[in-house]
Image (spheres, rainbow, N blue to C red):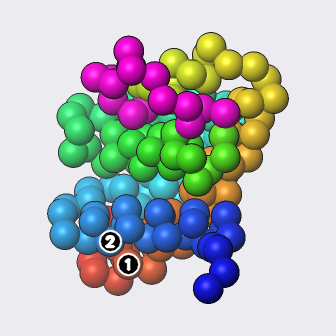
Amino acid sequence: MTAQTLEQKRAKHALDQVKALQKEKPGNYLSYVNALPAAILMNGLGQALATEFASGKNDSDPHRLLAKHISEWLLSKEAHTRYATPASEEAKLDTAQRLLGRIVAGDQDAYLWAQTEAIAYVTWLKKFANAFLKSSGQD
């Protein structure tokens, strides 16, 4: 059996996140994920992610869930970003807070790579959210 490609790993992670949302009430997650690529391109990954995180009232808010999904992917080893290295002092932080801290402490090359990776990942989130959340009548 051959190893999965990066694209397959992105798709699997995104599908797992969307399937988990089907069991909950995702609120406006679908509209937020559809708008996020444009926000990343206009404002950059850091500002777009910070906006999503700040817009959420609690951990089950669709804004925070979206920030969490992207952050979990970008912090994972599978994403091949420079932000995936573990740091014990950050263990108690939310994944979005951890990623934002690494973004502001990192260099431009790492940031641009992560931004490109985030857009590729969000493309899968959008596809699966549109396929599975809309068809179940949840928006």
Task: Specify whether 25 is left or right of 4.
Answer: left
Q: Nearer the viewer, residue 62 or 139?
A: 62
Upstream in sequence: badge 1 or badge 2: 2
* Residue 70 location (% of width, % of height): 49, 46
Please name which of the two marks, 1 or 2, marks the residue nearer to the observer: 2
Residue at the extreme right of the image, as rendered: 109
Q: Is residue 85 magenta?
A: yes
* Quadrant containing the C terminus in the rendered view: bottom left
How many marks do you count on the picture? 2
Magenta stretch prevailing secondary structure: loop
The answer to whether residue 1 is left or right of residue 129 is right
- Kindly identify the residue that appears in the image at 79 percent across and 23 percent down: 108
Instruction: Name the residue: 26% across, 59% down.
Output: 26
Q: Disc 1 to disc 2, how far (Cα)?
A: 8 Å
Q: Which residue is mark 2?
A: 19
Q: Quadrant of residue 124?
A: bottom right
Which numbered circle lies on residue 54?
none
Tell me where residue 101 appears, x and y as whole percent: 51, 18
Q: Are marks 1 and 2 in contact (CB under 8 Å)?
A: yes
Q: Is residue 36 magenta?
A: no
Residue type indicated by callout 2: Lys
- The residue drawn where x is 32% and y is 71% is 19
Residue 98 in sight in this render: yes
Q: Which residue is mark 1?
A: 132
Amino acid type shown at disc 1? Phe
The residue segment tinted magenta is 82-96
* Quadrant containing the N terminus in the rendered view: bottom right
Counting other residues with Cα less than 10 Å from the Cα at mark 2, is it few (<14), some (14-19), or many (20 or more)?
A: some
Residue 30 image position (x, y, % from top left): 41, 61
